[in-house]
Structures are given as C-alpha cells and as structure tokens.
Image (cartoon, rainbow, N blue to C red):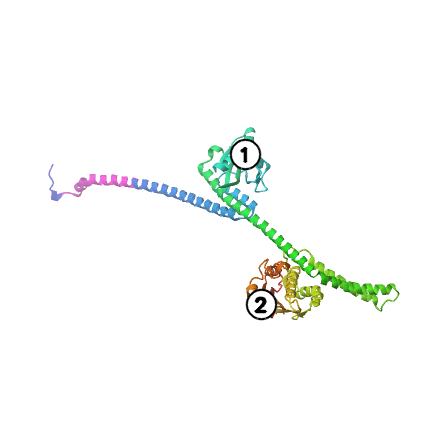
Amino acid sequence: MTAVSPKRRTAVQILEEGLPHFEQFIESRESYIKALEQTIGVLRQENTSAGTSNLAIRSSIDELVAMQRLSNTISTTNDSELIVRELIELTRQVIPVIECNIFLFDGASRLSPLSSKSSPRLQQEAQQQMEAGIVDWVIEEKKTVIIPDLEHMISGANGRNFVIVPLIIRSRGIGVYVIHTEKPQQEFSNQDVQLLSVLANQAAVGVENWRTHQQLVKANEELKSSHAQMIQAAKLAAIGELAAGIAHEIKNPLQVLLLHLDLVEAGRPMPNWTQMFSKQVRRLSDITHRLMNFARNASEDVTMEPVKLRKVIDDIVAMVHHEFRGCGIEIEMDQGGDLPSVAGNANYLQQVFLNLLINARDAMPTGGTIGIALSLTGFHVCVRVRDTGAGIPPEVLEKIFRPFFTTKGEKGTGLGLAICHKIILQHKGDIRVESEVGKGTVFTMYLPVWRAPQ
C-alpha cells in the first residue's frame, strides 16, 4: 500500500483516527447523564420527603399550639366543668378517650368527681382503685398506671384500659385523673405517658386556682354578711340612743288622741274631732313607718337605685329632731333647690346621715346648731353636715375613719364613722372632713348622680 504523506492525510483518515476518542466521549457522556438522572431522582425523592416532613412538622406545631391554648384555658379558668371539658379535648390528641374525669380527695378516704357529668362506671372504678391502694401508690410514686378494664375483658372483648394519672401541686397529691380508653396497653409509648402527665400537671394548677377562687368567693360572701350585720348592729345601737326621743314623739299624738277620746265618751266632742283623729293616727303611722324602714335588716348586696337625698335626710331629721331640740340643738336645712336623684341605697344612706347627726349631737353637749346643705357639683350631689361643736384635733382627725377608733370611751364602738366611710365608698362617692378646734366640724360627701342603664 502506498504510504500517504502526513501532510496529505484526507479527512476520512483524520475521522478514522479520531473515532475511538469520540466513542469514549459518548460513553462518558451517557454515564454522566445517567448519574445526573439518578441525582435528580434522589433530589426529587428527598424534596418529596422534606415536603412531607415539613407538613408533619407544621402539623405537630399546630397540635402544640392547640395544646398550649387549651392548657392555658385549663390553668386559668374558674369553671370546674370547663377544666374537665378542655382536658378531654387535650387528652384526645394523645390517646382515644371513652370518658374521663378528675377525682379529688374529699378528706374522708373518698374521691369526688370534679365534673358532674362523670358516669357511675367511672366513679365506681376510681373508688375501687382508691380502696385497693392503687391511687395511694400513684400519688406516692408520682407515676401513671394503666389498668385493664376487667368488666370489658369478662364480656369477651379486650383492649380497653383505665389510665390513672396523679394530680400533684407543690409536691402534694390533690387527686387523680382517670381516663377510660380503647387504646391497648402494649401500644402505649413513653411519650404518651409523659404527655398525659404534663396535662395532669396543667389540670392540677387549674384545680388549685379554681379552689382558691371558690375560697375567695366564700370569704367575700362572709365579709358581706359580716358587714351587713355590723350595719344592722349600728342601726339598733342608734335606735337605742334615740329611744327616749322616739318614745316621746309617739307619746304626744297618743296623749292628744286619749284626751279627745275622753271628751267623746263624755259626750263633749270637739269640733272636727274626726279630722283631728285622722291626723294624729297618720302621724303615728308615719313615725312607726320611718322607724321600721330604718330598722329593717341591711341587705348583703348593696343594690343601687335612684334615691332622692332630700327625702332620706328629711326622714332621719324627723326621727331625731324632738330629742335634739330637748338637748338645745337646732337643725337648719338648706335644700339647694331641685336636685337630681343619686345612685344609692336609701337604707344604707340613712345610716350615714344618722351617724353624722349623732356625732354632731355628742360634740355639742351644751347645745348648738347643725347645718345640712345640699347642692349640685358637676355630676355629683354634694351634702355638707356641719356642727358648732368643740372640733377635732389634727392628731385625731386623721384616725376618725379607722374601725374601732373612738374618743367616746366605753360609750363609743368606733364603728360609726368607719361604717359611713365604707358605705360612701360602696356608693362610688367620697367623704371628707374638715375641723377646727373650738369652732366645729364639717363632713362633706359627694354622691354620683343617677344615670339610667343604657
């Protein structure tokens, strides 16, 4: 074969020489593409897994947020039924629930259900476990136990269990959380038990807050009752102090009636004697009516209604004026024109003005003047009660509204002005005092004008 000069190689020769290298390129390229396709597949699979994982994470976060919200409700509510209801919703996110309830120790080796909607079956199971010593063990060891539902097993079925979780607050057992569930015992995980323990701890906080609230409500009711009894005692004490004057006020119309009755029986009736009889009987009726209104039991709840202060003060002045006049004390009234009603309780306000009038009388043993003035100041009716008595020294003035503080010795209880201060505050008003030794004292009260509920 004729040799071909290197300088005269044809294109075919060049292609033939390069062909093996081209085939190697093709093979490596195909391998690269296959590897790339495999990588893409792996990436797609990982991306799909990541998406599923993200969804699972988001779902878990949503569950945690829901559990946190419900847990906050349990630990802050003052409604025992709501505590159990929200606890059931939380528990259902952990295990299936047939029914459940919180059972608290009642101090007599018995368990009391927190919710009234507990079935007799669940109550019976809780009490049986109490008598068997299981509940004591759960509390002492601070551990959750899972007990088979024996009645369900006897009937030929299986899989139902009772879960008993301790309720612990400040290292002290207050009860147990009993759950009736269809979840088989072997399927319970440590995480399930831990979550149920966390829920029980939240429930224990809620139960403690609920108990504290119940105790505060009871204490408040007792306080209101004691306050009402104190008001009533002060009223009766005031009536006792005014008894002589009231008796004299009743005696006057009775004497007039008896005199005219004797004349009628003797056949010498006075002209218009029937009208006179009617007038004196109405007078007696008014006296007893005012006295009975004042003496009636003070209500524990101070219900507010529109009250005309002028009428309240007039009734009290009518009750004391005869005795005060006998002590050389004159009462001067400045009605202040037509004033709006205040938001108040007439029975309680009568006690305030009677206490102030009696204090003014005691400050003027040789007689004097009591001035009562009413006026409108903005959205308040202002009442000023002044006397011309001895006045109050500055060191005593700052103590006069304190309970049991008195300057009257054994005669005083120290409750009169303290009651006045309490009642005015209950009326969302204000009471102030000014005094100058040798010149007298002025009590000023501001009571809000009545506004009808919108």
Q: Which amino acid does label 2 sit on?
A: Glu
Q: Which mark is residue 263?
A: none
Three-letter code for the amino acid on which mark 1 is drawn: Gln
Residue 198 among those drawn in magenta: no
Q: Quadrant of the C terminus?
A: bottom right
Residue at mark 2: 434
The answer to whether residue 92 of the structure is visible from this angle is: no
- Find the distance from the CA under tag 2 to the CA under tag 1: 69 Å
Dot 2, how many residues are within 10 Å of its Cα: few (below 14), some (14-19), or many (20+)?
some
Tell me the SS state at disc 1: helix
Callout 2: SS? strand
In x, y percent, where is residue 197? 48, 40
- The residue positioned 47% from the left and 32% from the top of the image is 186
Which of label 2 and label 1 is nearer to you?
A: 2
Residue 331 position within the rendered picture, expressed as x and y whole percent measured from the top left: 67, 69
Task: Give the percent coordinates (x, y) of residue 26.
Answer: 25, 40
The N terminus - image quarter: top left
Residue 129: image tag:
1
- Given residues 88 and 356, the one toward you in this image is 356
Q: Is residue 260 left or right of residue 246?
A: right
Assess disc 1: are there few (<14), some (14-19) or many (≥20) residues with their C-alpha within 10 Å of its C-alpha.
some
Residue 154 appears anywhere in the view: yes
* Quadrant in the picture for residue 244: bottom right
> Which SS type dominates the magenta stretch?
helix
- Which segment did they paint magenta? 9-34
Side of 257 where 118 appears, left or right: left
The first of marks 2 and 1 along the sequence is 1
Q: Is residue 30 magenta?
A: yes
Q: Residue 306, image x and y in percent?
A: 65, 62
- Whether 204 is drawn above or below 225: the answer is above
